[in-house]
Image (spheres, rainbow, N blue to C red):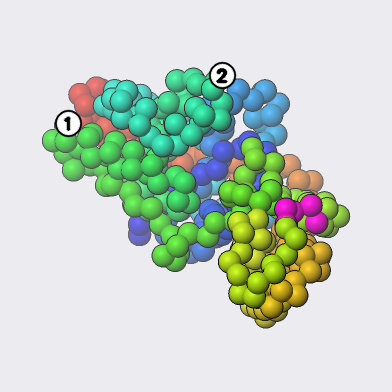
Amino acid sequence: METVVSGIRPTGYLHLGNYFGAVRSFVKMQDAYNCLFFIADWHSLTTHPRPEQIRQSARNILTEYLACGIDPEKATIYIQSDVPEVLELYLYFNMNIYLGELERVTTFKEKVRKQPDNVNAGLLTYPTLMAADILLHRAQKVPVGKDQEPNMEMARRCARRFNNIYGVDFFTEPESYHFSEKAVKVPGLDGSGKMGKSEGNAIYLKDDEATIRKKVMKAVTDAGPTVPDSPKPEPIQNLFDMMQIVSTPDTWNHFNDLYNTCNIRYGDMKKQLAQDINIFCAPIRERILELQADTQTLDRIARQGAERARESARQTISEVRRIIGFRS
């Protein structure tokens, strides 16, 4: 059975973009693959969170993983920092990758643009830590969004270079995995780009009905079309893209027809969209509240997941040490 590895940084709560971009894939894959899904708390250190934020955010993501349908009996769910073997593999990969290669990664350049006062070494080597997360379990597939493709290419490069340097065929180059030819991109509510925590344009799975409605009603729109069948500006296209994700085809077609005939009322569309988002999020939100109250179960799942992940990690590190020339 092929192995799948993927994770999410615990920098807050999961939003709809996380769900449709990764978590939904996790739920689908757990029945067909050997899946390891982790909470990437070491990755979050690039933004210097406080200790209490790290602990609580990891607990939040674990809770939401479970609420979304990831089954700890089918998949291994663990917190990254509970598996210290990843740091050793991270070190070996950093020895094999060059500064210029890391500086050219587009995700690094984007982070430098967004946080010019915090360009730390961890930010630079983020792709090699991600590679270690994946290759520690010798994964063949990784469910990722399109924005992570540069990091996936670095993971493949790490696998390739390790094999070439030591003359082995140990690591398989992992492939990005999507359930369709085009990954689902969930738009933000601010009129441009995709949904994200740092952009402040996200709807979280834990949001209550009133919060969802308030966020959607503030979504950016325009004065409306004046020419039939005219192209939709990006903010309007974002609303339709969101509706295509959470609403029925009949609902989307109804408002699309209104737009194309210049009869659209954005207020009506946003009310319907808010209602449909809430219908989608309601059962997940209820499950989140149930799990938050059961801390013993959450602790047990995290502990068991770490034990299983470390068993896989130790096997890889033992063999890597032997290949490099260190004692296992």
Residue that appears at 60% across and 22% down: 48
Residue that appears at 56% across and 26% down: 115
On the image, the x and y values in percent for residue 79 come to 55, 37
Which residue, given by chain and number where applicable, does mark 1 sit on?
Answer: 165
Q: Quadrant of residue 310?
A: top left
123 relative to 217 in the view: left or right: left
Q: Residue furthest left?
A: 167
Disc with the residue nearer the chain's start (1 vs 2): 2
Residue type at the position of mark 1: Ile
Q: Residue furthest right?
A: 210
Q: Residues within 10 Å of mark 2 (few under 14, many from 20)?
A: few
The answer to whether 38 is drawn above or below residue 289 in the figure is: above
Residue type at the position of mark 2: Asp
Asked if residue 217 shows in the view, the reply is yes
What label does residue 117 carry, if any? Answer: 2
On the image, the x and y values in percent for residue 57 come to 67, 36
On the image, the x and y values in percent for residue 320 come to 27, 32
Residue 220 on the magenta span:
yes
